[in-house]
Image (cartoon, rainbow, N blue to C red):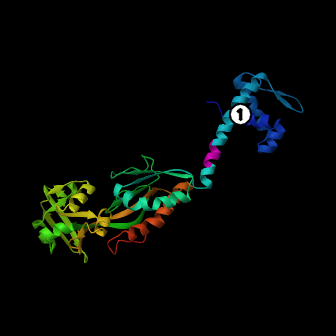
Amino acid sequence: MNDLNDLLYFVFVVRHNGFTAAARATRIEKSRLSRRVADLEKRLGVRLLQRSTRSISLTEAGEQFYERCVATVEEAEAAYDSVANLRKEPAGTVRVSCPLILAQTYLAPILPAYMASHPKVNLIIEATDREVNLIDERFDLALCARPQIGNAAGLVAKNLSIAQRILVASPDYVRRKGAPIAPTELPNFDTLGRLSDIYDGSTRWELIDKSGARLEVSHSPKLVSNDLRLQLETAVGGIGIALLPEPIVAATIRAKLLERVLPDWSATANIIYLLYPSPRGMLPSVRSVIDYFMTHLPIGIQERSVIADTFRTPY
């Protein structure tokens, strides 16, 4: 393979009208420049430069070759400049993965202010409930809500807050059917379940009270779905009691479309994490989004919470 550095040396010599001036400007030894240009001519089989004791001039072949070389060198310089500019200030595209409900509930309110203050940054936000591979899918960062992070090899995981899973029902359902006084009464009520609640053919909720005591309750749901929005709307419609993440029910509780049932009990909380690759070599655009999320998401989660202890200080 030809050494592309020789093209660069050739351009240096022509730009500075001689080996001595080129060596002085680039701090490359004159002998090295001369040798590399001579090697280039030898490989091409043509003379590119007419040399005299005082100056150089391009041959006809040299003129044609120089035009092509200059275009190549300028493209390379532009490539370096584009990356250098990205490192000077937040600019470019940042790709973010986020669960749909977190995007709607927590990202949507805070993004306009970020984008207004960072006009050169473009955001691509994939709102999805699937688990993504940041590295393979070329995401710059991701938000996720899980009981624990599991395997995050090669990633930084920051704890932003927690999302409690709480029992809710519509006021209309409570008026018609009443509300359980203890978790053991739940099997006597209409319930809504998720596919992940099914174990060995039985639908079960593992509940925790404020003291940390755990209780497993089996129930026969009227509806089973992995679609949280579908469960939410069904609960609002008065069909039964649902166990849902706080982010998805907070607005409906405030609007008095749902109310908490057994408020001293909840399921294992999901921790809201911010994940991103190692910060080494991180572009300012990505760093600016991470810093903004770390500052504003915990505050936004706290402000929209209907549970007093939702907020957790990030670490």
* Residue 246 seen in this snapshot: no
Which range is magenta?
79-83
Who is closer to the viewer here, 236 or 103?
236
- In the rendered structure, the answer to whether residue 55 lies left or right of residue 244 reads right
* Residue 123 seen in this snapshot: yes
Residue positioned 27% across, 56% down in the render: 229
User: Which residue is the extreme one toward the right?
Assistant: 54
Looking at the figure, which quarter contains the C terminus?
A: bottom left
Q: Is residue 118 magenta?
A: no
Residue positioned 10% across, 67% down in the render: 188
Who is closer to the viewer here, 110 or 205?
110
Looking at the figure, which quarter contains the N terminus?
A: top right
Q: Which residue is mark 1?
A: 70
Q: Position of residue 173 (x, y in %)?
A: 16, 66
Q: Position of residue 219 (x, y in %)?
A: 13, 62
- In the rendered structure, the answer to whether residue 283 lies left or right of residue 107 reads right
Is most of the magenta stretch helix, strand or loop?
A: helix
Label 1: how many residues lie within 10 Å, few (<14), some (14-19) or many (20+)? some
Instruction: Name the amino acid, label 1.
Output: Val
Q: Which image quadrant is residue 221 in?
A: bottom left
Secondary structure of residue under mark 1: helix
- In the rendered structure, the answer to whether residue 104 lies left or right of residue 18 reads left
Who is closer to the viewer here, 243 or 315?
243
Residue 148 versus residue 265 in the image, above or below = above
Q: Which image quadrant is residue 310 in?
A: bottom left
User: Which residue is the extreme one toward the left?
Assistant: 188
